[in-house]
Image (spheres, coloured by chain):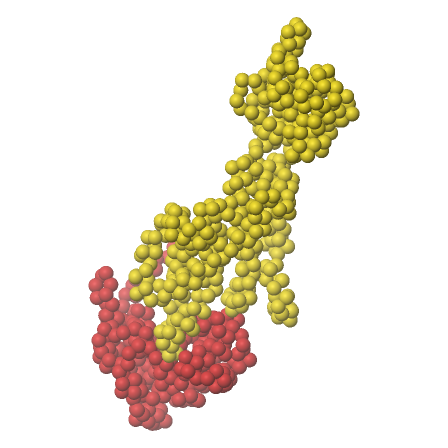
Chain colours: A red, B yellow
């Protein structure tokens, strides 16, 4: 497959971008993953969901994991959030190894997981109250966070009355209110329609710019990955290993116009090549049956 | 009629009313249309056949096949008496036999209001009735006497008045009097009383105080409700916490549920003797039976409801820093509450079944005690009002709790989208008028 345009290499970085990455790498390491493996035992035998992953995430970095379905993206994020345990290897947050889920590692799930019996405000207050914060203080903090995600008008409403995008904004506010060190988002916009998804991406970038939080993002949408991230981890399936770690050459601040910039397209092309490698068995096509000849010679 | 399409609210309530009216209508038709079913004859005037031990009194039912045989037998007996009398060799009749024949008119006299129910053995008053009917001063309006029977009455009166022109308890004919020929109307079997009979019997039972020390119907009703209440309350108090623990922690589940699962197959009533043995014959064994009947089901059902709570909610709470105790208190309990509430509604329905059995152990009490007593006496017209009362009680408590659900759990989808039933609308109107207005607008 040859491209009609001459795209620059995705490895080429403008000086501003290169400078940014240099600074980023000098920041303290927030999350360190060392020789992480996860095996599942199925009746058919052992499955290597993840094999010997090594990477590190710096403070306030936006890192995305992308890969074909079944590559262990969700397994990885669940292990990092403490909801699953690795078979071997280590995950360290701020240099300390961790056990089980905790408030330092917030998580936003694809299916919203708001507590349906609590109003929007009470949902955001949940983590604060669990920590033992007084009701008054928790309430005022929750209101601040709702202000940030633009939902203060809906504070008293139950989640079931909100649209998908609004629900996900509440879920993000709820996690951020806890002031986590790192926020994990597992395909958070996967269930949203294209327009809502686009505006949610902008929302997330805006919030991230204003809040000191490291973001670990899982998606299968290539545009989303390039648009949001500093770096992209490309996983491959069977066994789940890091295929490539890409530094996105698209300068910040990001805006929708950049979707057609050469750096953006080059990065996206690279991702596409990695995830859908030059169609290994392209001869295998779906058999088609045409029932009637239309006969208008339009093929 | 579209498959799986909701009807308009107007049509829905029309059909709801219809669902009650259809069986009521069928019952009425079967009861009042004499050409449908009616396999029996309900006797209005009865007679004793000589040499037969089975005795029928007025009010009893005999099958339509048997009735002609019955009345023909009496006619033959009368024939014999008449023939003997004509040959001047009258058959001897004891005072006792003749008194019995005279007393067969008593139910008819009661029906016409000439005698009180208690006066059926009052021979002096009966004498007056025979006289009145024979001389034509009394006319039976409730039960139309056949020509045949009027003849019998006249003939007997001629004999009676010859011996005793005025009433005298010692003077009765010494020769056999004629028997009244059985008379009746076609009717349904005793176990299907007509609606008006049921209403009358129910009204009588629920408004009059029984003469002996027996409790009134309302006291019985309250007694039944008390037993259900305590049995079910104890079941909830012990069962719900255990069930939530079993549903949340595999340790408790594996420790308790296998035995509970086994125990619930042992029918609770079989333990009733045991309960009476160690709890005595008071209400305690009855409450215990309702408890045992509901407890084991409750634990299993609610443990399962607890397990059905979305796991992702628990995970979300954990990533927000909730510890185990907080998960239980802040996520599991509030999360399962609406479903738990529904489970309890269903289990409350079951506890009525257990109540019926509970009330029959030891001393028979409550509504079931009444049903049992009247049932063995074939007073089915008095049984039905009680059965219907139990049905209505169950139905309306369930409707009430169903209506309350939307108010208790306004966040559930049903509460936000579902149509409000009459009870909910009523409570909403009573509690907060403005919120009701907002909801209907929205």
Between B217 and B425, the one nearer to me in the picture = B217
Residue farthest right in this picture: B137
Q: Quadrant of residue A206?
A: bottom left
Q: Is residue A257 left or right of residue B438?
A: left
Q: On the picture, is B172 further left or further right than A39?
A: right
Whole-percent x and y of residue A130? 41, 79
Name which quarter of the figure residue B112 lies in.
top right
How many numbered discs?
0
Residue B19 visible to the viewer: no
Q: Is residue B39 visible?
A: yes
Task: Please tell me which residue lies in front, B396 or A205.
Answer: B396
Residue at 24% in and 63% down: A42
The residue depicted at 48 percent of the width and 62 percent of the height is: B341
* On screen, residue A205 above or below A42: below
- Residue A81 is left or right of residue B191, and the answer is left
Q: Is residue A63 left or right of residue B104?
A: left
Asked if residue B223 is positioned above or below residue A200 in the image, the reply reads above
Image coordinates of residue B179 in percent, x first then y, are 64, 19
Q: Nearer the viewer, residue B51 or B192?
A: B51
Farthest residue to the front: give it: B170
| Residue at left offset 78%, top offset 25% | B137
A292 in relation to B98, above or below: below
Q: Residue at x 42, y 54 (%)?
A: B288
- Return the x and y of residue B312 as percentages of the image width and height: 38, 70
The C terminus of chain B lies in quadrant: bottom right
Residue A251, given in percent of the width and then of the height, sits at 39, 89
């Amino acid at each position: 497959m040859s491209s009609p345009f001459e795209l620059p290499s995705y490895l080429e970085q403008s000086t501003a971008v290169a400078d940014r990455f240099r600074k980023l790498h000098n920041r303290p390491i927030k999350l360190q993953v060392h020789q992480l493996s996860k095996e599942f035992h199925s009746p058919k035998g052992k499955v290597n969901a993840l094999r010997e992953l090594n990477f590190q995430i710096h403070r306030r970095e936006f890192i995305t994991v992308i890969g074909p379905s079944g590559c262990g993206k969700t397994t990885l994020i669940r292990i990092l959030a403490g909801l699953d345990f690795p078979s071997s290897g280590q995950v360290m947050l701020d240099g300390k190894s961790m056990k089980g889920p905790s408030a330092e590692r917030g998580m936003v799930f694809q299916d919203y997981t708001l507590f349906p019996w609590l109003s929007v405000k009470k949902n955001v207050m949940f983590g604060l109250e669990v920590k033992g914060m007084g009701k008054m203080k928790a309430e005022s903090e929750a209101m601040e966070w709702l202000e940030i995600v633009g939902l203060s008008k809906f504070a008293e409403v139950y989640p079931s009355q909100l649209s998908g995008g609004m629900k996900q904004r509440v879920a993000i506010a709820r996690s951020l209110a806890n002031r986590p060190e790192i926020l994990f988002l597992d395909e958070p916009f996967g269930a949203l329609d294209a327009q809502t998804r686009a505006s949610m991406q902008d929302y997330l970038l805006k919030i991230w710019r204003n809040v000191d939080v490291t973001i670990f993002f899982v998606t299968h949408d290539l545009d989303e990955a390039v648009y949001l991230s500093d770096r992209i981890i490309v996983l491959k399936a069977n066994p789940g290993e890091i295929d490539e770690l890409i530094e996105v050459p698209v300068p910040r601040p990001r805006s929708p116009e950049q979707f057609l910039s050469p750096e953006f397209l080059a990065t996206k092309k690279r991702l596409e090549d990695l995830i859908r490698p030059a169609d290994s068995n392209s001869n295998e096509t779906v058999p088609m049956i045409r029932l009637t000849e239309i006969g208008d010679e339009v093929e | 009629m579209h498959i799986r399409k909701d009807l308009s609210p107007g049509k829905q309530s029309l059909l709801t009313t219809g669902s009650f009216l259809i069986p009521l209508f069928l019952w009425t038709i079967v009861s009042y249309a004499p050409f449908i079913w009616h396999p029996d004859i309900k006797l209005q005037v009865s007679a004793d056949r000589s040499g037969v031990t089975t005795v029928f009194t007025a009010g009893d039912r005999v099958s339509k096949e048997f009735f002609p045989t019955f009345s023909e037998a009496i006619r033959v007996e009368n024939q014999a008496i008449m023939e003997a009398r004509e040959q001047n060799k009258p058959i001897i009749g004891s005072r006792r036999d003749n008194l019995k024949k005279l007393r067969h008119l008593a139910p008819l006299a009661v029906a016409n209001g000439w005698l009180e129910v208690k006066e059926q053995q009052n021979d002096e008053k009966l004498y007056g009735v025979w006289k009145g009917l024979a001389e034509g001063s009394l006319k039976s309006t409730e039960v139309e006497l056949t020509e045949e029977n009027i003849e019998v009455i006249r003939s007997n009166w001629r004999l009676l008045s010859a011996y005793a022109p005025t009433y005298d308890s010692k003077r009765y004919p010494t020769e056999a009097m004629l028997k009244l020929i059985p008379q009746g109307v076609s009717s349904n079997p005793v176990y299907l009383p007509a609606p008006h009979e049921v209403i009358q019997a129910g009204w009588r039972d629920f408004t009059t105080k029984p003469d002996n020390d027996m409790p009134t119907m309302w006291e019985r009703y309250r007694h039944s409700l008390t037993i259900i209440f305590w049995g079910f309350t104890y079941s909830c108090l012990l069962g719900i916490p255990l069930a939530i623990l079993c549903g949340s922690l595999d340790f408790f589940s594996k420790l308790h549920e296998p035995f509970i699962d086994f125990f619930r197959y042992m029918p609770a009533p079989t333990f009733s003797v045991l309960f009476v043995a160690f709890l005595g014959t008071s209400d305690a064994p009855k409450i215990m039976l309702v408890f045992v009947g509901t407890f084991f089901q409750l634990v299993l059902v609610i443990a399962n409801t607890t397990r059905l709570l979305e796991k992702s909610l628990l995970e979300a709470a954990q990533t927000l820093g909730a510890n185990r105790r907080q998960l239980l208190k802040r996520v599991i309990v509030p999360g399962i509450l609406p479903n738990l509430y529904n489970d309890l509604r269903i289990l409350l329905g079951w506890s009525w079944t257990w109540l019926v059995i509970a009330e029959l152990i030891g001393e028979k009490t409550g509504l079931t005690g009444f049903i049992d007593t009247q049932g063995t006496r074939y007073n089915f017209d008095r049984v039905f009002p009680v059965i219907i009362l139990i049905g209505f009680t169950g139905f309306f408590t369930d409707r009430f709790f169903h209506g309350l659900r939307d108010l208790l759990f306004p966040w559930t989808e049903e509460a936000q989208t579902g149509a409000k039933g009459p009870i909910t609308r009523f409570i909403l109107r009573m509690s907060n008028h403005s919120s009701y207005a907002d909801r209907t607008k929205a």
